[in-house]
Amino acid sequence: MPTLTLTQRNFDTVITSNPIVLIDWWAAWCGPCRHFAPIFESSSERHPDIVHAKVDTEAEQELSAAAQITGLPTLMAFREGLLVYSEAGVPAAETLEELIQQIKWLDMEQFRRELSNQAEAQQTPAYAPSAPEPAPRQAGHAATSDQYGWPGI
């Protein structure tokens, strides 16, 4: 399957309507981007079940800014509409294959739970409590590092 060109107009539709989408963020002036292009093309031929897409960062500057692209090439992976991977650099063909397998095997229920937990942890309370109540004293493992002897020794 040939790579698909993504623009501001079709980006959201492609991401949300395909199970797995790999995106190569590139620029014509970027030497490493030209090195990665045949690796990415070869992957698209080996994995017709995965959408392989490219974004020209020069032509799509607003889209690149929204995606917070700071290095080229950047490879992003979306699964079921969620960003599951993003890294700048040129992965070797074997590394890209391993990444694709990890994305295919990713437990999306667990991934969604982790995202939800992160979102809850980032929410700040509407008020700042004065002081936390001390925990009741109980026998058990000391709240220090795992060392032999008494805590603090």
Image (spheres, rainbow, N blue to C red):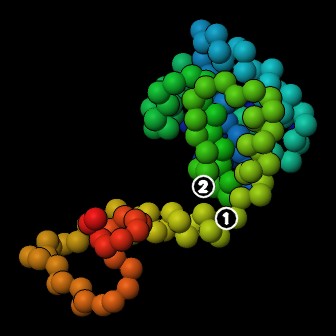
Q: In which quarter of the image is the N terminus?
A: top right
Crowding near the residue tagged with mark 1, few <14, some 14–19, many ≥20 C-alpha atoms within 10 Å: some
Looking at the image, which residue is at 57% across and 29% down?
Answer: 88
Q: Residue 108 carries which label?
A: 1
Q: Residue 94 carries which label?
A: none
Q: How many discs appear?
A: 2
Residue 91 picture location, percent across and down: 70, 28
Return the residue nearer the eye: 93 or 144: 144
Residue 11 in sight here? no
Residue drawn at (30%, 71%) of the image: 151
**In this picture, residue 134 sits left or right of residue 117:** left
Which mark lies nearer to you, 1 or 2? 1
Q: Is mark 1 on a helix, strand or loop?
A: helix
Looking at the picture, how far across and down is residue 80, in whole percent?
Answer: 68, 58
Q: Is residue 132 left or right of residue 59?
A: left
Relative image position of residue 23 (x, y in whole percent)? 67, 36
Instruction: Check the picture and name the quadrant holding the C terminus.
Output: bottom left
